[in-house]
Amino acid sequence: MASKLWEKSVTVNHDVETYTVGLDREMDMYLARYDVLGSLAHIAMLESIGLLTADELRVLTDELRSIYGVIESGDFKIEDDVEDVHSQVELMLTRKLGDIGKKIHSGRSRNDQVLVDLKLFIRSKIEDVIDAMTGLFSALLEQSNRYKDVLMPGYTHLQVAMPSSFGLWFGAYAESLVDDLTVLKAAYSVVNRNPLGSAAGYGSSFPLDRAMTTRLLGFDSMDYNVVYAQMGRGKVERIVAQALASVAATVAKLAFDACMFNSQNFGFIKLPDQYTTGSSIMPHKKNPDVFELTRAKCNKIQALPYEITLITNNLPSGYFRDLQMVKESFLPAFDSLTDILAMVTRMVSELTVNTDILSDSRYSLMFSVEEVNRLTLEGMPFRDAYKKVGLDIEKGDFKPDCNLAHTHEGSIGNLCNDKIAGLYDEILGSFDFEKFHTAFANLLGRK
């Protein structure tokens, strides 16, 4: 049985071990490759300050790269009697290299080890989310342009209100993703700072070169104050979860609209048959299960910041085991959101639009504002025009004019989709993902 990194002469009670480890082994599988990358940077720094020889660095680097390959192949596992990924990697090194493997922990704690693992993981996963977001953004703008001339009712209070269009409807969700991308950029900036070297939260008497590990891992800067580096655990996850929740909120609203507009009472859109399910008793049913489940999955993600807050909001400075519990909901959330975005992109790309909605007379009154505006342009005071049209409606004399002349920016006749795309591209270009890709390739000897 492997001993714990912290174990001395007393063996911990088995039930206590089971209770405290919890799902950590499963969750740490998300972090395995990043733990190796953090160790590669750390040992390079240790050699630079004389805590490893050049030969020791070489053999440790070779073996860590080998372990990374095992992780990539899917053959890596955390053994049952090993606490976490950090212990597993160190155990594999010592089995292969002997006492040299025990040297990699000099100048760090599992506290800053998991901090750097989490930040490296989050940074990569934000890129995955943005790739998936970009696919949905493009699909929404494509549909907006395709159906820009198809009118539909706009609603306030779920009452027919004013003319809208599918160009506006699809484009609105695209622009919402622009704001979500802005929030993700802020979260990414918080993540992209190096905590390595803060050790247990109070630094080290070793002359650690934190600027070196910052550079080797492709961070923009470091978390300078070692106490704050540790205090950032939980806070970083909450900030990132809020950014994920922002994306999820956009998609959840889109899913609700799609379910409603697909129903027979609306009939505005038609979902592809292959993305609907049937009823066990009603042979006519085509249920929008994908969008319904999307709504629920997105709502779970929107709950995540509050869950993290409730776990962490009554903790003082310093490390506490409570923080371990954040992993269980937080780490899987990225894959959940990317899966949601991929599925919704397919749905949006393939749904079709009813181009003849306005032939139904129930939507005639949505042109009442157009008539008020026409009379106002002819010189009638707006309030008088409003009253006249209202009285005509009451008497049943209102005759809608369906010809629209909306020309201002962002309106039915001037969607500004090119401007929306430009905003998205500008924010997207501010993420320097290539910086950490290059750093990782250098650490792994692949460049």
Image (cartoon, grey):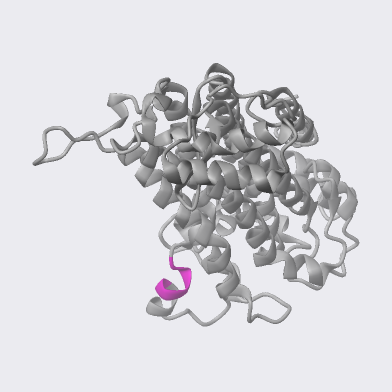
* Dominant secondary-structure state across the stretch colored magenta: helix
Q: Nearer the viewer, residue 206 or 395?
A: 395
Q: Nearer the viewer, residue 212 or 429?
A: 429
Instruction: Give coordinates of residue 341: x percent, y percent.
Output: 50, 36
Instruction: Give coordinates of residue 163: x percent, y percent.
Output: 54, 33
Image point (45%, 39%), residue name: 75
Is 280 placed left or right of 110 in the picture?
A: left
Instruction: Give coordinates of residue 379: x percent, y percent.
Output: 75, 34
**Above or below, comparing residue 52 to residue 367 in the picture:** below
**Above or below, comparing residue 230 to residue 216 in the picture:** below
Q: Assess whether residue 19 is covered by the magenta stretch.
A: yes
Quarter of the figure with the C terminus: top right
Quarter of the figure with the N terminus: bottom left
Image point (59%, 33%), residue name: 371
Quarter location, residue 277: top left
Is 293 placed left or right of 248 in the picture?
A: left
**Segment tinted magenta in the rendering:** 18-22
Number of numbered labels in the structure image: 0
